[in-house]
Amino acid sequence: MKILHTADWHAGRSLHGVSRTPEIREVLQEIASLAIEEQVDLILVAGDLFDNKNPGAEAEQAVYEFFLSTGQAGIPSVVIAGNHDSPSRLDAVGGILKLASVYAFGEVRVAGRGGTFSLKIGEETAQIAALPFISERRIIKVADLLGSNPGQWREKYQQGMRSLVNNLTQPFASDTVNLLLAHTTMNGATLANSEYQFHCTEAYSLSPDVFPASCNYVALGHIHKPQAIQGFPEHAARYAGSILQLDFGEQADKKHVYIIEAKAGKPSELVSEHVIKAGKRLKRVKLDLDGLERRNSELAEFDGWLKLTLKLDQPLPGLKDRIKSALPNVLAVELELPSQEQLVRQGVDLHQTSLLEAYEQFYEHERGQELPADLQQAFKDLFEAHHDEGSQEAV
């Protein structure tokens, strides 16, 4: 059977205040068209359909349009929740999604209670084990289902995951295509640096031997860089990666979906790595003011999103706003200034930087993103109110 593997859609994602959902929608339309054109038999979506647990209507529309078009084409899908998804929300719409031939798994289930199921596709039968993302706290609930000691599961996440995988893969047989979907971190995986770092730490990492040799293919999600997994046979396990460059740390990454050929009792084969064409590219550019002037036309013609780092000799109030007004494709501007001691030695008047600009720089340094418009307005209102009070006292 021919399988399309994708993951980490992150519908609802914003970058520096700009919604990426319209781009994600275009990418999903491209993937749906590919699945129909290639006549795939099954689509595996390994988690993080959405960027947060309460996605907006636009994000939901983009995701459900995909499943509607593939379902109408007769292509079934299996979907698991990632760490960004709401498991209960996904389970709540599971019954409706099944009308579009979508098998959705929000909460973790064990074998015998829906965690593993059979799906007849043509002359082949697939045994599919679904392993949504599971945190240390939530794995304790699964431990109860398996009759294990919850205390031991708290201490040893990897042992708990191993027990769960063993449970889910028990129904695998030599005459079925055995597929496992998991949203997790594997040892040795290369991060794209746009993932939620806490859930990618060593405590959440699994060894390749967690998954049994009976798996024809392990479809992984969670890590945003497409890659094979060390320690697995070739083409037996992969991260599909995110479908869009989600952050500027991914600016050099090409985005893929995989098409895999799987057959009972035989090693899986990689049919193609489809490079995704839709969506805007991200690019970081570092220059000084002279360089900005020389390259202004080039930057304006770039058809993706830009992040500029400007090296300045001294603060220039209002510069960020002027750049963004002239270059709408610039999402973020970082200012690289000499240290305060250097500025003092150079005789630069530090008071020429407004309090608001100082706060904007502080916020961007601390949070790694620009000051939100609502917080900016609140700061202005507070400053103006304080200024007015000071003026009245002076009178």
Image (cartoon, rainbow, N blue to C red):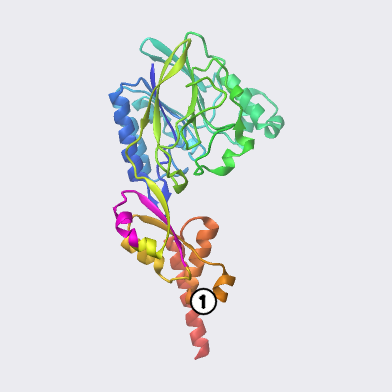
| Residue 81 % position (x, y) | 48, 34
Residue type, mark 1 in image? Val
In screen coordinates, is 242 left or right of 64?
Answer: right
- Vertically, is 184 above or below 281? above
| Residue 395 % position (x, y) | 49, 91
| Quarter of image, res 96 | top left
The magenta stretch spans which residues?
294-312
| Residue 391 % position (x, y) | 49, 85
In screen coordinates, is 23 left or right of 334?
Answer: left
Q: Residues within 10 Å of mark 1 (few under 14, many from 20)?
A: some
Q: Residue at x 37, y 43 (%)?
A: 59
- Vertically, is 274 above or below 250? above
| Quarter of image, res 326 | bottom left
Viewer-side residue, 108 vs 299: 299
Q: Residue at x 63, y 23 (%)?
A: 163
Which residue is disc 1 drawn over? 348
| Callout count | 1
Q: Quadrant of the N terminus?
A: top left
Q: Is residue 301 magenta?
A: yes
